[in-house]
Image (tube, helix red, strand yellow):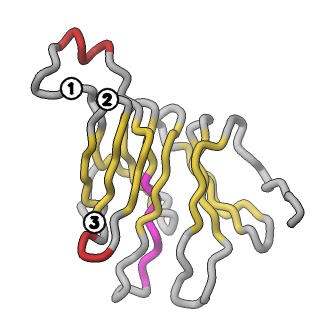
Amino acid sequence: PEAKSSPQPPTDGITALAYLPPDATTSSSSLVASTSWDGSVRIHDTHTMTLVTSHFMEAGPLLSLAVVPPPPQDSSSSSVLVTGGLDGSVRKFDSATSTVSVMGKHTGSSSSTSDAETSAKKVGCSCLVALQGPYEGLVGSAGWDGMFHLWDSRKTTT
């Protein structure tokens, strides 16, 4: 296959890519989401080679990405994108409404960590995964703090 450049690429390196699942009107998806060191999440249509949306996430550089598909029984919902930031934040982006909410944050602390050690720790959220099956809607995150968290993407947060 021939390599093609995406239109309106990020201003810094891409850190993660994920195809969005097909919606109720299509049998396949041509939408791919990406995160970047420039702090933005983008959705490109690989069929039409266009930028669908771009949103600055206010978390500094973005390190990770997960796509939470809509529940199978809800054909009116769209996928939710979850990003992990260098600042340790886990944020969800609803592409249908362009709204962002913070699901949680890696803090670098544990019960055995002193305050001095916590402030010196790196907290970036470097890995995200959307769980499936009976755990649908949950997102797992892991970070530079050595911690693993589970977040419920269905809950409303700010």
Q: Nearer the viewer, mark 3 or mark 1?
A: 1
Q: CA distance from mark 2 to mark 1?
A: 7 Å
Mark 1 belongs to which amino acid?
Ser
| CA neighbours of label 3 inside 10 A, class few (<14), some (14 to 19), many (20+) | some
Residue at mark 2: 145
Determine the secondary structure under disc 1. Answer: loop
Q: Categorize mark 1 by other alpha carbons within 10 Å: few (<14), some (14-19), many (20+).
A: some
The numbered mark, 3 or 1, whose residue comes first in the sequence reads 1
At horizontal 51% and vertical 40% (from top left) the residue drawn is 63
Do labels 2 and 3 touch, CB within 8 Å?
no
Are the residues tagged 2 and 1 within 8 Å (C-beta)? yes
What residue sits 36% from the left and 36% below the top? 143
Q: Which residue is nearer to you in this view: 98 or 27? A: 27
Q: Name which residue type carries label 2.
A: Asp
- Dividing the image into 4 quarters, which one contains the N terminus? bottom right
Q: Which residues are magenta?
A: 76-82
Query: Any mark on residue 92, and which?
Result: none
Residue 80 shown in magenta: yes
Marked residue nearer the N-terminal end (2 or 1): 1
Rounded to the nearest angstrom, the CA distance separating label 2 from label 3 is: 25 Å
Asked if residue 98 is among those painted magenta in the image, a careful observer would answer no
| Nearest to viewer (mark 2 / mark 3) | 2
Q: Which residue is mark 3?
A: 154
